[in-house]
Amino acid sequence: MADNLPSEFDVVVIGTGLPESIIAAACARSGQRVLHVDSRNYYGGNWASFSFSGFLSWIKENQQKTDIDECEDWRKLILENEEVISLSKKDKTIQYVEDFCFGDQDSAEDVEEAGALPKLPVFGASGAEGAAQESKKECPPEEGALLGAESREPDKAAGTEPASAMEGNDTEVTSENDSSQNTALDESSLELGKTEAAPSETPAQEPKKVTYCQIVREGRRFNIDLVSKLLYSRGLLIDLLIKSNVSRYAEFKNATRILAFREGKVEQVPCSRADVFNSRQLTMVEKRMLMKFLTFCLDYEQHPDEYQDYKNSTFAQFLSTRKLTPSLQHFILHSIAMVSETDCSTLEGLQATKKFLQCLGRYGNTPFLFPLYGQGEIPQCFCRLCAVFGGIYCLRHPVQCLVVDKESGRCKAIVDHFGQRISANYFIVEDSYLSESVCTNVCYRQISRAVLITDQSVLNTDSEQQVSILMVPPVDVGKPAVCVIELCSSTMTCMKDTYLVHLTCPSTKTAREDLEPVVQKLFNLNTEKETENEELEKPRVLWAVYFNMRDSSGIDRNSYVGLPSNVYVCSGPDPALGNDCAVKQAETIFQEMFPTEEFCPPPPNPEDIIYDEDEIAPEDTGFGNSPETKPESSSEESSSRGTTAVKKEDNEK
């Protein structure tokens, strides 16, 4: 409760998104007293992951947009020489939410989610576990139903503290029962699971019929991300996870293939040298062309004469001069560089291609990793580090206002929903908490998002356990390219015999208007039994949701009106595929607050800790007056369990 909170901290962080969580962890690690609060009842903000029932609750909340009741007595805490900056009581970052069920939704009205607790009030560690259905009516058994399947770990169903909530979220995945390649990060390495995906004997068989009733019952097997991203294997987030040792709290799976959509068909793109030479799609001449160009991109800075004349041209125009066939140009532009055909300059395209190539081979045949249980695990991992080093967490804890000293212009304190005044030196606020009066001059962009549950992959192969990324070129002139990420059940984000598909692009209209044309090209939306043969070959959509999310990245600090110098604003998710923007923002803010402190240093090795002689009782240590002792375990070791043993990376360049 608010009455039990200390009244003074060094840093108060409002919002539990990825940038805020990284800053909170960095501050706690450097010895600062951190209070981390969120008005929501789940971690992650717009970076969160939800079970299916939790996601339905989130949809309902954002369609209704209810107000938070205001405490009446908080103004008594404001002194004469102080003024307030009121914070927003409504989350206005999500708009135009539309969900569709392409099955018999009525049959699942009274179905209870397997393993759900009745009327559970708290959202789980990986997202919202909505209140269970009151009725206990069983779903009638159907062909292909997953009867008696175990639900996700019970410990993940509840908990409000990261240190305890994450305990229930054991990140070790047993590879004996999983046909996926799982990945665990540590100091400088990452080890793949030893069990390879077994080839399917009948890849062309008809997919099992999955009903909406089964999806509801197996809802705890879903972890649906609000924002769809992948981690570059040599990106800033991976480097930070390894450096800070936060990687021990999570596990990852390789993205197994890069796809392309060309001439109405989905096909796999060869990325690595081995893929190129084993590809049956390319002729020998094309293989030599592609390898020559990719080799050039790896050290293009050393050959400025080859691109100097095209600095003011688009990357697509530059590619057309490089003796590449149209199919190779398409692969490079949309599946390797993953850039816009009209807006990307030559230098930007070369940089993107080089980044892609540099990330190849570190942990797999593609540059990307995906965190098991969803993107929402990453903010929680940093929250856990903060909690380990003394950070205090409060969910369902709205903040009424920031208290500003009129003379100095600095923020002195916050007043929370319970009427308690809490002082601090620095304040971190997620953009969605700022009121309209502060954001008058801010011009926000939007991100169009869609999430689909389908019955098969967009490109069936011998192995069902694939994590795929597909960039679909613009459908019409003026439309953006659409990023499609398809997740299989071994990522712990969906139930068996289903796929979770995320679509993302910068908004031009509502999410449905932006993304539905792409969905119609790739998937079968027809619920009738009689469909054309062409539609039958496409994956069937079982359930879908569209929504627009605010993109507050890249906004200049001066755009916010009347913001005190010791208040820092963190943005929500950006539309980029990686997480570099969030990591850069977190490090920049931390260094502005504490320029002499290291950003997220590695935790100390218990064996290297040296205590003063007067702090050690000889009878407790057994070493007499020796100043050195080896503690039994560190606080981090006691809060971490089930981490996978790893070894040094052999192919580190």
Image (cartoon, rainbow, N blue to C red):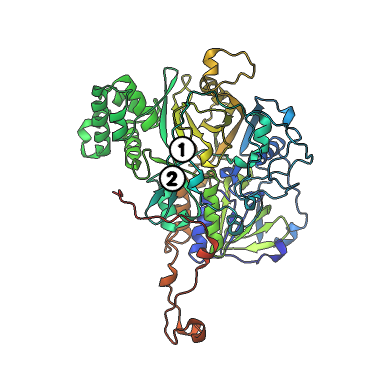
Res 282 quadrant in image = top left
Q: In which quadrant is the N terminus drawn? A: bottom right
Question: How far across and down, in percent of the image, does residue 268 sit?
Answer: 39, 27
Residue 575 visible to the viewer: yes
Residue at the spot of label 2: 580
Residue at the spot of label 1: 576
In the image: residue 327, left or right of residue 140:
left
The type of residue carrying mark 2 is Asp
Nearer the observer, 161 or 141 = 141
Is 611 above or below relative to 566? below
Circles 2 and 1: CB atoms closer than 8 Å: yes
Is 637 above or below relative to 174? below
Disc 1 is placed on an element classified as loop
The type of residue carrying mark 1 is Ala
In the image: residue 499, left or right of residue 346:
right
Residue most extreme to the front: 201
Res 346 quadrant in image = top left
Disc 2 is placed on an element classified as helix
Question: How far across and down, in percent of the image, does residue 579 sit?
Answer: 46, 44
Nearer the observer, 108 or 522 = 108
